[in-house]
Image: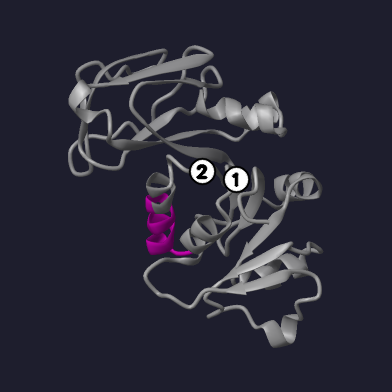
Amino acid sequence: MQNMKMALIVGQGEVNQSLLNDMAPNWPLIALDGAAHMMREKGLSPDIIIGDFDSFDPASYGTENGAAIKISEQDTNDFEKALYHLKPEMLVGFGLFGKRFDQAMANLHVMAKYHDVTKIIAVTNDEVITVHKGRTRLPAVEDALFAIIPLAPMRFHASHGLAYELDGLSLGFGACVSSSNQARTPFIDLVPEADDEDVFYACCRPLSLIERDGLDSDGLCGLFA
């Protein structure tokens, strides 16, 4: 199943179980390490279980319902192991946030690191989170959340469609972020300064966006353009 086009991946954080249940019949299902045990309790059988197996017990689980892939190196977390081993073109991630803060930040780092390889959509109970760089035009839900969180210091040349525009604004941790912004139009234009076109930033939008635009691959791809 390497080089798969689309997949769902489940970590050990907070899982939007309703959405996962809706999507699970349609795509390959990947469990990160001990998330396989949690999924079994919810009646789901992953196609692949991958990780260093520090929280997954193959003996008690049994692998007849899924291929178990152990990767022992400790330079990466289980999320990154899945990405570099399976190489999906797109994935929707559940349980990537909400358990441990350090792991949530590490997973956000991985989303940026693999930005040019895999389109990654992380979902929580309320939000959809994507990572971008450079100039982009993204769909939005009018009068709803559209937060921009820089992953390194950066400056925006302009934006269009936000309640609080970013024109000429420098963003960075310890300086300014745009965490409580809102969309005022159906699409938001974000234009970083030329010197900062390679700096990654995360965008948080309401979960209703994917419920509105559809859970098929075309609808999910639309989150990026």
Q: Is residue 179 above or below residue 137?
A: below
Q: Is residue 77 above or below residue 109?
A: below
Instruction: Residue at 19% x, 18% y: name it.
Output: 168
Residue 3 horizontal/vertical position (percent): 61, 50
Residue 13 horizontal/vertical position (percent): 55, 61
Which span is picked out in magenta? Answer: 99-109
Question: Residues at badges 1 and 2 in contact (C-beta under 8 Å)?
Answer: yes
The furthest residue to the bottom: 59
Identified by mark 2, the residue type is Thr
In this figure, which residue is indicated by the disc labeled 1? 91
Residue 120 horizontal/vertical position (percent): 52, 43
- The number of discs equals 2
In this figure, which residue is indicated by the disc labeled 2? 118
Q: Is residue 23 left or right of residue 186?
A: right
Residue 78 horizontal/vertical position (percent): 50, 66
The colour mode here is one colour
Main SS, magenta region, reads helix
Instruction: Residue at 39% x, 58% y: name it.
Output: 106
Q: For the residues marked 1 and 2, what is the alpha-carbon distance in whole angstroms?
A: 7 Å
Q: Secondary structure at mark 1?
A: strand
Q: Nearer the viewer, residue 79 or 34?
A: 79
| Badge 2 density bin: few <14, some 14–19, many ≥20, Cα 10 Å | some
Identified by mark 1, the residue type is Leu
Residue 106 on the magenta span: yes
Residue 144 on the magenta span: no
